[in-house]
Image (cartoon, rainbow, N blue to C red):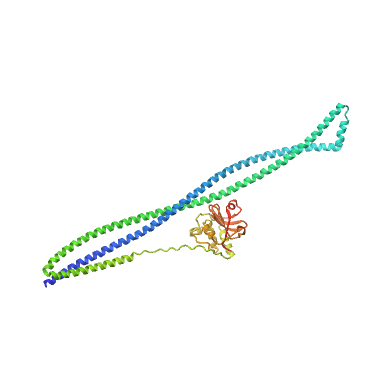
């Protein structure tokens, strides 16, 4: 009886120790797996943030390169502006000098006309006198009326002087008339040159106006994107720092839990050793061999149960460690198929014309719902929007550019372009600007100088930048 009670007591004691050890092991392992799961989640988030930071840094580098390239282009334009201003100043001075010369010529012409008028009067009077007397008879009468040889000589000299004077007068008259004609032609030539110079100045001003406005708009957009990219990068850096702090906290907790587990394991081993020693002593007194066999069997079962629980926990942790996958669908490029229906052309032109003079240019604008609602476009997004209002799809809101538009439809020659065709201009780059041709040398566009407007293909700036690239997207 005593032996049975001792066996029961020993079994109960070992059961309590085994269950406590199992519960401790399970709870500690579950907590450790939870920490590991959180650490893995933070690691994944950190990797995502780092990837986004790399993208932002690459984007920032690209923007900086674009800005540097644009600054170089603007330096070139600035040099052209200085050269043009110098030419304008020189031309203005030439115009002033020419105007003064014209005034002097006008005075000379006035004086010459007076001399011609005076000589004309003299010649008219003399012609009338000669007509009355007869020119040859008049001179002969003068000579024959001499009273002496000396008087004859005097009269002959006088007649010769008059004849010579008349001849000189006629020569001067011819010379002054020729000079008058030459002066008048010179004045006309100067006037023509003056008009040409004025036209050149006007053309220079127009070209500079478009070039400067275009570069300033691009630079403004680049600076805005640089600011936003830097803000995004700062936000990502803050996220990265926060995740690093969380990761360090989890690592510290893991170390603390590991140390606590080590101490608990040591205490458990010490308690178990002491209990086993006491049990052995009690068992020895009761029934050494039978008790030892019972204890060994129970200990084996407890160990098997602990191993099974650990395996189940590991399987559960592995199952929960899956990652969600975000699928990215690439944008579908705009169809290259020629659209049908002349009505679509008129609808697109009507939509675009409705905001002429009411839509300022916005480089990179028109690529979100807010910009579209505010009618804030650049050249390519304006063309895309106008045709979208007519039910014609020229590409995605965010992906449309002059580079995509120039690949749509079919190419046509400039001599065969018609209303609704897309016309391209080599502004800041090849095919850097686009508009909708209206006919009669006019096109509808959104430019950095005037916003949405109707412009002439014969405008000096557009004429100089149009290389004949035309695409027909609707017919």
| Relative to 87, residue 366 above or below | below
Quarter of image, res 39:
bottom left
Q: Position of residue 132 (x, y in %)?
A: 86, 37
Residue at image point 26% right, 59% down: 258
Would residue 52 be seen by someone viewing this image from the given angle?
Answer: yes
Residue at image point 26% right, 57% down: 256
Residue at image point 26% right, 64% down: 27
Quarter of image, res 326:
bottom left
Q: Is 387 placed left or right of 181 in the picture?
A: left
Location of the C terminus by quadrant is: bottom right
Number of disc labels: 0
| Relative to 171, residue 17 above or below | below
Q: Is 470 placed left or right of 299 in the picture?
A: right
Q: Position of residue 103 (x, y in %)?
A: 67, 40
Q: Determine the residue located farthest toward the bottom in the rendered image.
A: 1
Quarter of image, res 138:
top right
Q: Nearer the viewer, residue 211 or 328?
A: 328
Location of the N terminus by quadrant is: bottom left
Residue at image point 42% right, 56% down: 55
Q: Is 328 placed left or right of 287 in the picture?
A: right
Would residue 228 be seen by someone viewing this image from the given angle?
Answer: no
Q: Position of residue 177 (x, y in %)?
A: 74, 40
């Amino acid at each position: 009886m005593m032996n049975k009670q001792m066996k029961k007591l020993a079994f109960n004691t070992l059961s309590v120790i085994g269950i406590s050890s199992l519960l401790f092991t399970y709870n500690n392992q579950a907590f450790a797996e939870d920490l590991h799961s959180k650490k893995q989640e933070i690691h994944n988030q950190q990797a995502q943030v780092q990837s986004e930071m790399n993208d932002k840094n690459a984007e920032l580098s690209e923007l900086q390169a674009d800005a540097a390239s644009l600054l170089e282009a603007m330096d070139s334009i600035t040099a052209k502006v200085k050269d043009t201003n110098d030419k304008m100043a020189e031309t203005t001075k030439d115009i002033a000098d020419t105007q003064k010369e014209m005034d002097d010529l006008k005075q000379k012409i006035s004086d010459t006309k007076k001399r011609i008028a005076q000589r004309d009067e003299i010649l008219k009077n003399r012609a009338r006198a000669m007509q009355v007397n007869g020119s040859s008879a008049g001179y002969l009468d003068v000579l024959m009326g001499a009273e002496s040889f000396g008087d004859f000589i005097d009269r002959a000299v006088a007649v010769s002087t008059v004849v010579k004077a008349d001849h000189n007068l006629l020569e001067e008259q011819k010379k002054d008339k020729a000079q008058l004609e030459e002066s008048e032609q010179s004045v006309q030539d100067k006037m023509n040159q003056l008009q040409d110079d004025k036209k050149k100045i006007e053309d220079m001003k127009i070209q500079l106006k478009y070039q400067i406005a275009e570069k300033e708009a691009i630079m403004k957009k680049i600076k805005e994107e640089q600011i936003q990219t830097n803000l995004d990068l700062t936000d990502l850096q803050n996220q990265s720092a926060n995740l690093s702090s969380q990761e360090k906290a989890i690592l510290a907790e893991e170390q603390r839990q590991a140390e606590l587990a080590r101490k608990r394991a040591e205490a458990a081993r010490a308690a178990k050793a002491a209990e086993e020693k006491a049990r052995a002593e009690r068992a020895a007194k009761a029934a050494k061999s039978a008790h030892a066999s019972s204890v060994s069997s129970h200990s084996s079962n407890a160990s098997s149960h602990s191993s099974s629980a650990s395996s189940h926990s590991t399987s559960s942790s592995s199952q929960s460690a899956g990652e969600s996958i975000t699928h990215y669908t690439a944008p579908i490029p705009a169809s290259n198929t020629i659209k049908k229906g002349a009505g679509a052309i008129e609808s697109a032109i009507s939509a675009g014309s409705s905001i002429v003079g009411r839509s300022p240019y916005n480089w990179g604008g028109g690529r979100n719902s807010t910009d579209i609602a505010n009618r804030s476009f650049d050249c390519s997004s304006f063309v895309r929007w106008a045709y979208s209002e007519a039910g014609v799809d020229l590409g995605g809101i965010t992906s449309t550019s002059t580079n995509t538009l120039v690949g749509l439809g079919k190419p046509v020659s400039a001599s065969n372009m018609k209303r609704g065709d897309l016309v391209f201009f080599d502004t800041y780059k090849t095919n850097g600007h686009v508009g909708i041709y209206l006919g009669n040398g006019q096109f509808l566009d959104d430019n950095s100088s005037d916003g949405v407007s109707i412009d002439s293909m014969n405008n000096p700036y557009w004429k100089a930048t149009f290389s004949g690239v035309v695409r027909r997207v609707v017919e």
